[in-house]
Image: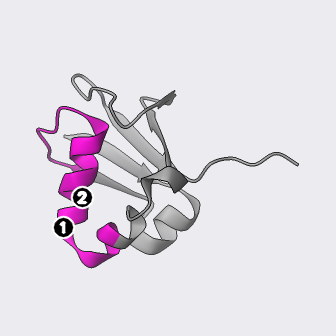
Amino acid sequence: MIDVLYFAWVRERIGVPKERVETEAPTVAALVEELRAREERYAMAFADLAAIRVAVDQELAGFDAPLAGAREVAFFPPMTGG
């Protein structure tokens, strides 16, 4: 089990801020593919991965990051400065 957190418009499209996911996905990218296959709202949220950043256990990571031993994955839009 892994906690998956969604922030900003990613959360708005999926409709929940957080969920526990049963997965054997070896990487973040594989987890995204599992989520996309669930329902249309996930497919829409993850349609453009260039517009999404990811953190594994609260550290910025890439979509190729391994999930072995991870407890939490968060998806959010890129931060913009001001």
Where is residue 41? Give x, y as percent: 33, 75
Where is residue 13? Give x, y as percent: 45, 73
Would you say 18 lies left or right of 36 here? right
Task: Give residue 42's quadrant in the image.
Answer: bottom left
> Residue lying farthest left?
24
Q: Nearer the viewer, residue 63 or 35?
A: 63
Would you say 56 lies left or right of 71 here? right
Pointers 2 and 1 in contact (C-beta within 8 Å) = yes
Where is residue 71? Give x, y as percent: 31, 31
- Crowdedness of circle 1 by 10 Å Cα count: few (<14), some, many (20+)? few
Which mark, residue 38? Answer: 1
Secondary structure, mark 2, is: helix
Secondary structure, mark 1, is: helix
Predominant SS of the magenta segment: helix
- Crowdedness of circle 2 by 10 Å Cα count: few (<14), some, many (20+)? some
Residue under pointer 2: 35
Q: Residue at x 17, y 65 (%)?
A: 37
> Residue lying farthest bottom?
40
Would you say 81 lies left or right of 67 here? right
Q: At label 1, which amino acid type do we have?
A: Arg
Quarter of the figure that contains the N terminus: top left
Can I make out residue 15 in this image?
no
Which mark, residue 24? Answer: none
Q: Is residue 49 above or below residue 30?
A: below
Can I make out residue 36 in this image?
yes
Q: What range is drawn magenta here?
A: 21-43
The number of callouts visible is 2
